[in-house]
Each structure stands twice: as C-alpha cells, then as structure tokens.
Amino acid sequence: MKYKLLKAQREFLEIPHNYNLDVAVYQGGYGSGKTFAGSLLGILLCLKFPGIQGLVGAQTYTLVRDTTLQSYFEHLDNMNLGQDYEWSNSLQKLTFKNGSQILFRHFDEPNKLKSLNLGFVEIEEMSDIPYDTFKMLLARMRQKPRKEWKNFTYRIFAHTNPEPQKGWVYKTFMLNPPPNYRLITAPTTQNIYLPEGFCDELKKLYDEEYYNIYVLAKNGNYNSGLVIKDFTDENVKDITYQPDMDLHISCDFNVDPMCWVLAHKTDDKVFYFDEIVLENTTTAKACEEFCRRYPAHRGKVIVNGDASGDNRSCTSEYTNYVIIKKKLAKYGYDADIRIKAFNPPIKNRIAAFNAKIKNADGDICLYVDKKCEKLLYNIYNLKYKEGTSRIDIPTYTQIKQSKELKFLSHPIDAASYLVDFYWPITL
C-alpha cells in the first residue's frame, strides 16, 4: 500500500529539528486528514521502533473508539498487517509481533495514567483536554530507548480543530512556542482527495464564522463572548521598566492566588510591565516579592487596587493597605495609597478597561508586556456566561480538573482597579 500524503501531513510526520522531544499539532478543518495522519504516524513508530510503548487518547473514550481506533484498523488493513498485530478488547490495547504496544484510553481521569512510561502519545481533539493533562503526558515521555533504535525521538502528536477562543493550545503553540513545538495548519480545501464540491456544500451549510474555523482552519473570532474586547497583538509590546517613573501596584487580595499587576502610566495611557501572582500566600509575602524584584526603584510607589483591602480581617489587626505601607517602608519605600472609598460595579471596571484597549477613535491606550502571562491569559479567556452579562467564574470542580482555571478573574480584577481609578466610566 502506498499513500500520497498531503503537504501538511508530510510536515506533521517529519521532524525538522534534532531535539530529544518533538511536540506537533495538526490543526485542520473537517476532512483535512488530521486523524488519518495521526494514526498513520502511530503505526509507523511501532514498526520502526520494536518494543515502543504508545498511548492514544482523547478526553472521552467514545471519541477514541469511534474515530481514532477505527482509523488505526483501516491503516492496518490497507498495509496488510492483519497477521502482525493483536487487539485486546478487554485491555483496549494493540500489540504488535515486534513487541510494540499502543494503549487506547480516555483522559477524563489523568491520574490513572501516571504510572506509564511512554515513547509516544497521540491526542485526539487536543483543544478538548485540560492543559494540566497535557503537562502530565509530557512527564510520561520516559520509556528507556533500546540500543537498536536509531535516531529515536520522543513524540507527542495531536490533531484538533482551530479553537474558537484563545485557549491553552493557542498560548502554547502560537504565542511563544519552544523550538521543538510545531503547529501545522491544514484547511479542508487543501485535501485533494475529498469528493468534488465537498467544500462548496459546506459553505452553503455553515455561517461565515463557522466555515472560516472548521473548513478554512482559521483562528476563531476570539472576541466572541469574551469579557475583554478588541484586544489584539497591537496591545502586546515589550515594555521597559523605568526606575525613575512612578510605579503603580494594583492589587487583588485573594489568598490563592493573590494577584498584583505593576504598571507605569501617563496622562492617557497605561503600561502593564509585570505581575506578581502567588499561590497560598499573604500580603506581606507579596510585598517581599515586589521588593526582591525592584530593590532600587527611585520614582514614587503608588498602590491602587481593591477597596475592600482597606477593611480589617479577623486574622490581622491591620488592613491589607496598612500591611503594604509598613512592609514597603522597611525597604525604604514611602508608598502612596490611592484607592476608592468603595468598589464600583464590575461592569464599570470592565467598561473602563475595554475603553483603554481601543477607544471609538481607534486610539490604543493600554499595553501589556508578555511577562504578564496570567493577565494575558485572562484577557484571552475570561468569558460571560452564555446569554448573560455575568462573568463565568470557574467552579471548584472545574479548578480541580484544570489548575490553570484558578487564575481566571483575579488578574483582570487587579488590572481594572487601576484603570477605573484614573479613567472611570459611569454607566
């Protein structure tokens, strides 16, 4: 059996670097050959490296069984390898005569996979799995290579449709990917083996946005449903910390995580150049982290943030702002506390923040440095509950499944307190 692969499929299969690990994502539209390429690669690795241990999975086992596994069987039939493997339905495992094995699993309970030592992993619909699961799978790439394996590279390969929102796949593979991480984009229209008129029929069936994402493999309209609107690459820039300028610390006092953003500002612009995001911490420890990073700031230190931080708690005789002022004074800073008497409605803060991103005249007055990872994560992912004007805050159960979700809402709260203090909007 000979296959004539599409350009994107060849790019997906072939490794263009010499790193010990290759991580590749085939991002394509419907019918672009994603699953075909992934299952082919899994079989080729099993044949090339006898005894290799592979894992194939998706968030649900139904997807693995009905899509990926069927593609494996089709390849095995096409290659006339029926005598060279055994399938165990009870173990959900392919075993080749040369000792190679592939487990087929769901990722809904990733802790059950922690004992595996693997040579490769294939992920179906990668954008459906949590980032924590992906990180766990990275740690499974530790099967000891055999001496006869020439030019062996650990491989994680995945396929997915483009994300309607900027999720972790976008952040990991498009914003600032490591040199051994690859994203291959494959529109459905480039698959020359599809029936004639296939894409034309889809164009009649789908609305424009859906067609652009799921046929042309374009990234989605990331503003759809998002709390923060019109934020683009123009708002992201390298911002140089200025030791002689006023330095603004804007605080959200949640304990886990505590989120502070650091900024410079002019009369009409704000520049977020750093963030302090700490888990299971205290206000005093956050102050210490600030002083560690900026031990010799010569300009003023101005503290903005959550007005409720000026209330005493049952665990301290001091308010958060008194703690900040006292702690910074020990390091030689005379911090100027500037907060409102009470917090405005969150919709006011969000409106003020969005207005600075780009106003009606097209002027950009808000910039964020790439160092502010959690703030950018919020900007790209914080959404409203569908059909409402309420922000969709992750539940405790959701956070247990994906730790990164705990960082939603608090960084944007910290950043918007500052904007609302200096450029408020009354709704």
Image (spheres, rainbow, N blue to C red):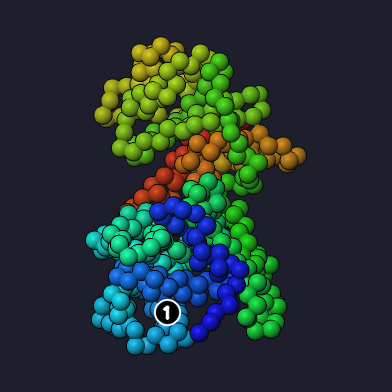
In the rendered image, the vertical position of residue 290 relative to residue 238, given as above or below: above
Q: Amino acid at mark 1?
A: Tyr
Q: What residue appears at the point 46 percent right and 41 percent down from the top-left corner?
A: 374
Q: What residue appears at the point 39 percent right and 71 percent down from the top-left corner?
A: 48
Label 1 Cα neighbours within 10 Å, binned few <14 / some 14-19 / many ≥20: many
In the rendered image, the vertical position of residue 123 relative to residue 95, given as above or below: above
Residue 97 image-quadrant placement: bottom left
In the foreground, 354 or 159: 159
Q: What residue appears at the point 30 percent right and 37 percent down from the top-left corner?
A: 280
Residue 124 image-quadrant placement: bottom left
Q: Report helix, strand or loop for mark 1.
A: helix
In the visual, does 198 lie left or right of 339? right
In the foreground, 15 or 69: 15
Q: Position of residue 399 (x, y in %)?
A: 36, 52
Residue 320 image-quadrant placement: top left
Q: Position of residue 260 (x, y in %)?
A: 44, 32
Image quarter in which the C terminus is found: top right
Q: Which residue is mark 1?
A: 72
